[in-house]
Image (cartoon, rainbow, N blue to C red):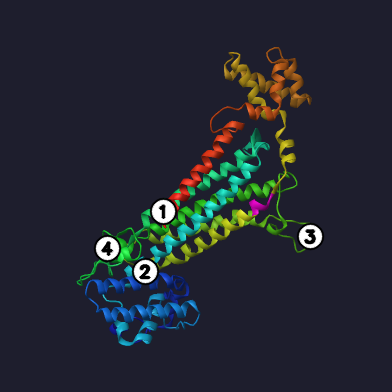
Amino acid sequence: MTLWKGRFSVSPAQELMDFTESLSFDRLLWMEDIRGSIAHVKGLVHSGILTEEDGTILQDGLRSVANEIESDLFDFNAGDEDIHSAIERRLTELVGETGARLHTGRSRNDQIATDMRLYAKRAVLEIADELVALCRTLGDVAESSRDAYLPGYTHTQRAQPVLLSHHVLAHGWSLLRDLERLIETYRRLDVSPLGAGALGGSTLSLDPDFVAGELGFSRRFQNSLDVVSDRDFVAEILFDVALIGVHLSRIGEEFVLWSTEEFGYVRLDDAYSTGSSMLPHKKNPDIAELARGKSGRLIGNLMGLLTTLKGLPLSYNRDLQEDKEPLFDSVRQVSLALLAVRGMISTASFDFVAMRMAGDSEYLVAVDLAEYLVRQGMPFRKAHGIVGGLVRDAVERRVPLAELVSAHPLLGEVAVQLLEPQSAIARRVTAGGSGTEAVSDQLRAFSSELEAQQKVLSELR
Ligand code: ARG
């Protein structure tokens, strides 16, 4: 049964119902919908629009509906258009004609906007908690691999030796920015739409500030037309989540590479790897691959919603119903991904020997030789040319670089000492760089930044 049949002479066509229904996906919002309705009832009583007695009947009825849904006893009807209709129908079955007073001064337009913001607040905090946990795991890996080093890469070519902790924290910082971004998104979306009605408010003396407070929103809407048509918050979450997905895809890609026999930097735990149905020896990094692969879908969800929103006239349009499936999907997928990636990383064992062997290539400290010459007063470009020439010679004649450095009049034995990668790392002095001391400072900064964000999160709750 629809909520709007009074205006129509015949029942809706089946094709219309099949095409326009949203119950199949918006039933996920039942808890938010009932919370919103209870606050609305309290608001109506508070404003003297409903008697205390009716208010109590409606609230008790709504709580019974909640119990039925929670314990799986609720019968969704084929004719229920959406979660709002299903709950109002059942409420009226339970409490009789008082149920018909529930929707006083309200539209499904402010109702769904309220449900979505309540859901979004919860979802954002859950994703934020998972991000914190993953950041902590990365911090632990960085902490426990203090001296381990490997080649840092640019263009996927070995470039300079870097500490493993420096590399791991690079991913950590990107996830910390994601956390900060989610917190900003949360603050912006924390607005109650309830009281906006269909689009222009009501002739009844509703109190939007009161219901905003009841629902734990920090403020109410300023413009009823805006708030029933605004889905910026959904787009923002989809962007935040898509970027988390992109960051996870980069971590995933490295784990795929690092777990190959060719790299051999990491061994995944059996519980976080998969096998082949045909090739008995295979051990595959499927979590890392799907962390990479799912980013496509997360980006797609964002593109889909932005395309739906583009060109919509004010205010509510049914197109806006298309906000739900992408949001629910992105929230679920990113939560699963964050958990799986965290499990994969926290159980992985890093092969420090394989990393060191790759990082010990003499060429990776070539720039240190050039900087040695710079310290003697030589212009950098000239020093770059001299060292580049030595590397070319070493490659072409297949001789160790150290031999050529030792024989060079401007370099010699002192410079040969510089070729040892571990000492090269210890020598690196730039703040925020991969030097031993700089990375210790960075680890401290990372933990304190993470703690600060966690504090902000607990204050939002
Ligand atoms: N299912 C709708 C949505 O998700 C609820 C609001 C319906 N409003 C309306 N005027 N038909 O947007």
As helix, strand or loop, the secondary structure at mark 4 comes to helix
Mark 4 or 1: in front is: 1
Q: Percent from the top left, x then y, of residue 212?
A: 31, 63
**Label 1 to label 3: alpha-carbon separation:** 52 Å
Query: Label 1: which residue?
Result: 459
Of the 4 image quadrants, the one containing the N terminus is bottom left
> In front of the other: label 4 or label 2?
4
For marks 2 and 1, the one nearer the N-term is: 2
First to last magenta residue range? 344-348
For label 2, the residue is 112
For badge 3, the amino acid type reads Leu
Residue plotted at (34% across, 67% down): 317
CA–CA distance in space, label 4 to label 2: 18 Å
Q: Which mark is residue 209?
A: 4
Q: Earlier in the sequence, mark 4 or mark 1?
A: 4
Q: Position of residue 260 (x, y in %)?
A: 72, 48
Residue indicated by mark 3: 279
* Relative to 19, residue 428 above or below: above
